[in-house]
Amino acid sequence: MSALKGKMVAALEVQVYESGKKGQPLAQYHTNTVYVIELKGTLRDVTSPVLIEETAMLSALKPLWHQIIFDVSQVINMSTGGLGGLLQLYHKSDKTAEKARLAGANEKILTVLSTTKLKTELFDTYATLEDAIASYQR
C-alpha cells in the first residue's frame, strides 16, 4: 500500500500517513499506529466527498485504525457540511477506536465544532500535531 499523494480537487488536498513517516508508504499490519489525515484548503459539503474518496484505501487498515488524527492546521475554512465528511470518515474506522483527535484547528473550525457540540463528544482538540500524537502515547 502506498501513501496517498496530495491531490487538489475542489479546493481540498488530502494526504494520509503514519505519524513520523510523512511521504513513506503506509504499513499494513502495525497495531497502535497513529494515522494522520492531513487536510489543506477548504472543507465544505462539496469537498467532503473528496475526503471520503481519497481515504477509501484505508478500508484495508480498518481493523488496525484505532488512533486517528485529523490535521486541520492548513484548513482555511470548514462548514458543517465539511464536518459531516469528517464524521463519515470517522464512522468508517473501527468502532472500538479511541476518540479522534483534531490538530491545529483555527477559531473558525473550533466555532463549528462548538456549535454542533461535537468538539467534546467525538473529537479531542489539540493546538499542534505533536500534541495530538503525544496524547495517544500517554
Image (spheres, rainbow, N blue to C red):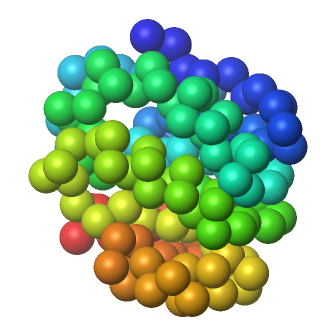
How many numbered callouts? 0
Quarter the C terminus occupies = bottom left
Using the rendered view, name the quadrant where residue 113 is placed: bottom right
Q: Residue furthest left?
A: 96
Q: Residue furthest top?
A: 1
Is 45 left or right of 31, judged from the image as shown? right
Q: Position of residue 65 (x, y in %)?
A: 27, 39
Q: How far across and how far down the image is residue 109, in percent?
A: 67, 76
In depth, the one of 75 and 27 nearer the eye is 75
Which residue: 13% across, 52% down? 96
Indicate whether 125 appears above or below 111. Answer: above
Residue 69 visible (yes or no)? no
Q: Tell me which residue sits at (51%, 82%) in the image.
A: 116
Residue 70 versus residue 22: which sits nearer the camera?
Answer: 70
Q: Work out whether 53 lies above or below 20.
A: above
Residue 122: x percent and y percent? Answer: 35, 71
Quadrant occupied by the N terminus: top left
Left/right placement of residue 107 relative to residue 61 reads: right
**133 over 54 or under it: above or below:** below
Residue situated in front as seen by the camera: 84 or 4: 84
Q: Residue at x 80, y 55 (%)?
A: 42
Q: Is residue 54 above or below residue 20?
A: above
Which corner quadrant of the image does residue 136 belong to? bottom left
Question: What is the x, y in percent for residue 9?
Answer: 82, 32
At x 45%, y 86%, the residue is 117
